[in-house]
Image (cartoon, helix red, strand yellow):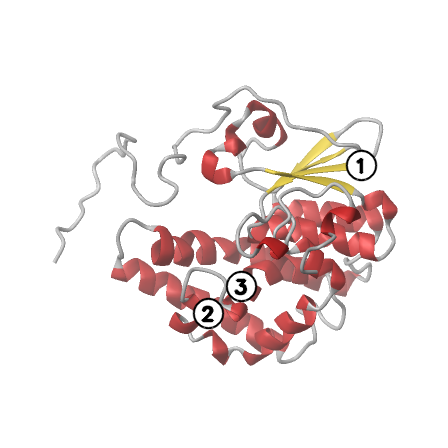
Amino acid sequence: MAEEYTPPEVWTYDKESGGRFASINRPTAGAREEKDLPVGEHPFQLYSLGTPNGVKATIMFEELLELGHTGAEYDAWIVNIGEGQQFTSGFVDANPNSKIPTLVDHSGDKPFRIFESGAILVHLAEKFGEYLPTDAAKRAETFSWLFWQVGSGPFIGGGFGHFYAYAPEKIEYAINRYSMETKRIFDVADKRLAESRFLAGDDYTIADMANYPWLAPFIYGGIYNEARTFLSIHEYKNVERWVHEISERPGVKRGRIVNKTWGEEESQLAERHSAADFEGKNV
């Protein structure tokens, strides 16, 4: 049995904690390198990576373009968080929290930033009048499921994902704790989707766009190694039905591969600057 850890009276950062992201993790914020962000020709400039949080934004853009909103054209620039590119001065100016995705809206007289994936979804939904109901009750339901994901996502990624796949050592308590919570999250979604087609009701909304990138990889078995089997994800039949339906949407097919640099080549699109960039891709 490993020796029990006793926390010090005052915690100090005196060594790396180990694990996949140890080299970039620090207890301080701010820029570590002077470098401006690139800016393309379109109204929206997205700085991101094809992780679940990043995919929320690219799905939204592609869904808006699928509806014919040409004003939603965007440039998607890759930010390699494993190499610490989120700590450049340009990125920190756009997002003081140094997390992806980050968006700069150039569609008006003066550019402004929007950071945090949920905020980006709300901003675009309100700007284009899509995927966010105007009816008060339906709008409240959409926001409830949107922010349910914002609150539950860290339990899946930073909790289960970290301790199951990335931590330098397997800690039984931590894995059990976050496995239980991840399964509870799936059960919440499964029970809701047993009574409605989509999370907020009969209509597809930003609540689905927020939750889909986090739940879908478990259904397909494409996240955290063997997590699908480990967590018995096959039990959640309603989530599976919902994932398969959303996966067939053309905007989702495109959005899933933007800023993605792993997997089969046909499923990767490191940067997106026009619809032509999808030629030859598996969409």
Point out the image quarter for the C terminus: bottom right
Nearest the camera: 101 or 181? 101
Left or right relative to 231: residue 217:
right
Q: Which residue is mark 2?
A: 184
Q: Secondary structure at mark 3?
A: helix
Q: Which residue is mark 3?
A: 217
Q: CA distance from mark 1 to mark 3?
A: 30 Å
Q: Which residue is mark 1?
A: 43
From the top left corner, tell me how far across and down residue 46 is, in percent.
68, 39
Q: Residues within 10 Å of mark 2 (few under 14, many from 20)?
A: few
Which residue appears at 68% of the width and 50% of the height?
Answer: 58
Q: Nearer the viewer, mark 2 or mark 3?
A: 3
Residue type (three-letter) at the residue carrying disc 2: Arg
Residue type (three-letter) at the residue carrying disc 3: Pro
In the displayed orientation, state which residue is furthest to the top: 34
Q: Nearer the viewer, mark 1 or mark 2?
A: 1
From the top left corner, tell me how far across and down residue 146 is, in percent.
64, 57
Dot placed on the residue nearer the N-terminal end, 2 or 3: 2
Q: Residues within 10 Å of mark 1 (few under 14, many from 20)?
A: some
Q: Secondary structure at mark 2?
A: helix
